[in-house]
Amino acid sequence: MKNIWKQKSINESTFDYFVNSGKSPLLSRLIASRDCLINDKKDLSKFLKKDIGILDQPESVPNVNKIFDVLNKKIKSAVVFGDYDVDGTFSTFMLMGILYKYGIKNIESYIPHREEDGYGLNTVSLDRLIKSFEGKTPDILFLLDCGTNSYQEIDVVKIKFPKIKIIVIDHHIIEDKLFSKNADLVINCRLKDNVTAYSTGGLIYQLGQFMEKETGINFKGLLPYAAITTVADVSDLDMNNRVLVANGLNELHKVKNIGLQELIKISGIDAKNCSTTDISFKLAPRLNANGRIEHAKEVVNLLKCKEESKAFEMALHMNSINDERKTKQKNILNQSIKMLENFDKNSILLYNEKWDCGIVGIIASKLVEKYNVPVVLFGKSGDKIKGSARSVAGINIKEVMDMASEIFDGYGGHEMAAGASLKASMVSDAWRVFDDAVKAYKKEHEIDAGIIEYDALLPKSTFMQIDDEFCDKLDKFAPFGQGNRPFIFRVNGVTLDKIREWSSGVGAFVLIDSTKTDGFIYEENASKLSGQKLDILFQIEENFKDDQKWAIVIRYFKESKKYYAGIGSRSTPEEIKEAMTQIAKELDRNGYTLRSGGADGADTAFENGASNNKQIFLPWEKFNENSSDLFEYKKEHEEIAEKHHPRFKHLKQGAKRLMVRNTAQIVGKSLDDELSSFVVCWTSDGNDSGGTGQAIRIAKSLGIPVFNLYHDVAVTEMMKFIKSH
């Protein structure tokens, strides 16, 4: 699938508000690009301060206020059944602590085995759970991070144990036919609209807050655990989840839990300065590795451990299991990439019976990052073919799986991730069926390419000035994660030098056009890029080198194509037209490709000079001859014209049409994908008035240099620009 780089849509009213308030256009754009709606200075203050006091009240979570309708002092025993990932194991530990303080002293936990039990409450895990009761039926059963769609399984429990109470605390998508309406209580943020999509750990935190208000019992200390589950489960970082994560990570160094302390140390994390990156790439993988390789119940045991020496041994063992996981992961990833030579589909679906089912989800995420398409990978567990799915922005993987349901024995999940088991009889046809479903989904939702969005195009001069102060300002928008993505910037025409490949072979240190800040690139054989002119998409991340604070991390790159837009007005003088032709010839020799524009005469002058490198657009007069051409341009470019020029909607029809066409020429047929390096133009008064001036302003708003031949210095300045680039 072709990838298009596209500048992210922004909230125009937010952008205008902050520009008018004195913020720079770049900062205003970054504020307006956030998924959390920021309307004014008050909202921005909340966003940046992240005070715990602005967290929604616990009663905002559906059914939290009904907890005491089921949970009462008559209950003396409980079993907590939690999923095998970080969210499930940590929320299990959190709830056990709450129940103990509430007065229930007989509490057991059950964490299913990933391979032997499978996900959630199913036929196998239910049978093993009941056997674990050993004839001592608990008064209440909690289902955490699962159970929302377990009507049949809950029915079995209710028939076998009529007196048992069942409470589901979960955040997964609700399926009407399977919904657990027979449970005594379901606490799920998806039961109502406009409720924060908390992790299960986040829901447990809110439950603890409510119970503390009602009973006066101190349930403090849960916040760091809620923060870890929110990040590890890739929950959307809306205003509430950002507050949970920011405050929870700030309190991480205060946690008295010996087991968690030991694992944090072994993970190489500074508890006083822990970031979401530390959780995602250091702590969570070690916690999840237990469930992938051995048994996730050991995570709960680690958190319950009271002996420092024992906790150290357990943490050390988890670390070794994670090393084993990384080795397996690398092998599977390499095998997958080899299977994808000459890849040209809308999706990826691969199966290898030797692949570890507990690890394929991680590799699926890696392949999504590399190929920018939905991915499903399967391995074999016993006689079952099990796997994990991951998706890209804009494609709901759960809905795609609904469209290809005939290939699965079972599946479940949410918009961006899912688990599934594949029918053995469908192995040979599965990829075709799934790919057809993705293709149909894209057609229905008018998705014609893989979109890689970036927040802002930086002029070369701004890029060269990136330093610690610039990066520190960006960091105020943290914590970053799903729903509050790290800023992605674009800069065009940079050169990579002094490339030093890492011994691991997965990346390199690079110098990017003599910038002040270290550069990294995650690319095999990166030295092949030395000296090439590239357009890059990059992020600012913490530098893992001790002597540097920040690094420029290149996420995507492509050969820098040198386009320029040539625009003139209807009254362009003959001597200027001659100059345009000579300029076009010089630019042609320098390898620049022309996008011709403007009134008849100006575009011809440019075209005459650009004999080899031309990408011509229709002259103005042709619009009146062929209305279908006008429609094509409007359909393709009107949106971006409106985005970059607020007055667009109020222009007269003639000027509006001209602006659409000139926007097309400046920006390029694939919109933000192939921006022009600069604009050469002529306007009758040297200012940005008229239709050509409208297009010039759009170019400037995109950070594209403009050289107006009305001014004598234009050619000199343009040649300086060309030589420096």
Image (cartoon, grey):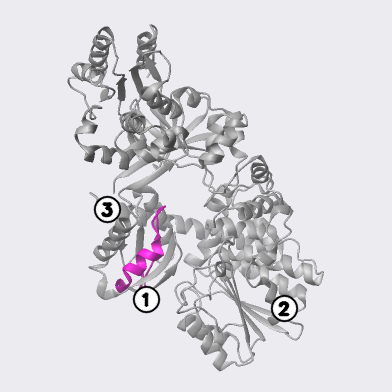
Instruction: Name the spot of residue 468 as percent of width and height, x first.
Output: 59, 30
| One can see residue 548 in this view | no
Residue at x 27% of width, y 53% of height: 340
Instruction: Name the spot of residue 494 as percent of width and height, x first.
Output: 39, 26
Residue occupied by mark 3? 340
Is 603 left, or right, of 381 in this rendering?
A: left
Magenta range is 379-407
Is 501 left, or right, of 484 in this rendering?
A: left
Instruction: Name the spot of residue 170 as percent of width and height, x first.
Output: 57, 70
On-image quarter of the C terminus: top left
| One can see residue 479 in this view | yes
Instruction: Name the spot of residue 378 as percent of width and height, x first.
Output: 35, 65
Residue 187 falls in image quadrant: bottom right
Residue at x 36% of width, y 48% of height: 370
Q: Residues within 10 Å of mark 1 (few under 14, many from 20)?
A: few
Give the secondary structure at mark 2. helix
Q: Amino acid at mark 3?
A: Leu
Residue 68 tag number: 2
Q: Depth-wise, is mark 2 or mark 3 nearer the camera?
A: 2
* Camera-side residue of 430 and 1: 1
Give the secondary structure at mark 1. loop
Residue occupied by mark 1? 382
